[in-house]
């Protein structure tokens, strides 16, 4: 599965957001995702499996619990691919930052 196929799903993106904050027990992920997306535990498990198999998430066993964490390498690859497009928005963001700073100076 290609990276953007994995990231194209809002449930998987949300799981990665949770994992970016800190490691998560699978049960905690299921609770949040079921509450936010109204999907079954089995459906959440399928999304976790896709993240594991595509190497976007690591899992380690702690007793009877599965602990998930985000894997940096695939995200770095996505970032590298997006890098060639930054030329389109970075100058605009830099210009916006300059205008905001200018406005703050004028108010002081």
Image (cartoon, rainbow, N blue to C red):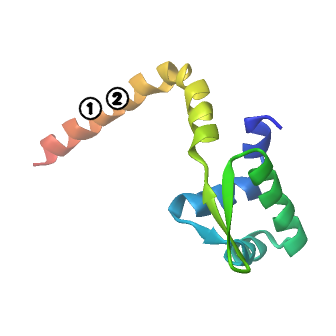
- Can you name the residue that lies furthest to the front here? 63
Residue 63's image quarter? bottom right
Q: Is residue 4 above or below residue 83?
A: below
The answer to whether one can see residue 40 in this image is no
Q: Residue 88, percent across and down?
A: 51, 21
At label 2, counting other C-alpha atoms closer than 10 Å, the crowd grade (few under 14, some 14-19, many 20 or more) is few
Q: Residue 43, percent across and down?
A: 88, 66
Q: Are marks 1 and 2 in contact (CB under 8 Å)?
A: yes
The answer to whether one can see residue 50 in this image is yes
**Residue at mark 2:** 94
Q: Is 8 left, or right, of 108 in this rendering?
A: right
Residue for point 75% across, 53% down = 52
At label 1, counting other C-alpha atoms closer than 10 Å, the crowd grade (few under 14, some 14-19, many 20 or more) is few
Q: Is 75 left, or right, of 103 in this rendering?
A: right
Q: Could you tell me which secondary element the residue under label 1 belongs to?
A: helix
Depth check, front residue: 62 or 36 = 62
- Can you name the residue that lies furthest to the left here? 108
């Amino acid at each position: 599965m290609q990276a953007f196929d994995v990231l194209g799903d809002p449930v998987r993106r949300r799981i990665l957001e949770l994992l970016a904050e800190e490691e998560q027990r699978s049960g905690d992920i299921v609770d949040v995702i079921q509450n936010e997306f109204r999907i079954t535990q089995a459906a959440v498990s399928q999304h976790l499996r896709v993240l594991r198999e595509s190497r976007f998430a690591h899992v380690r066993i702690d007793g009877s619990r599965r602990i998930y964490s985000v894997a940096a390498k695939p995200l770095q690859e996505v970032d590298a691919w997006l890098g060639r497009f930054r030329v389109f928005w970075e100058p605009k963001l830099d210009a916006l930052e300059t205008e905001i700073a200018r406005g703050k100076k004028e108010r002081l």
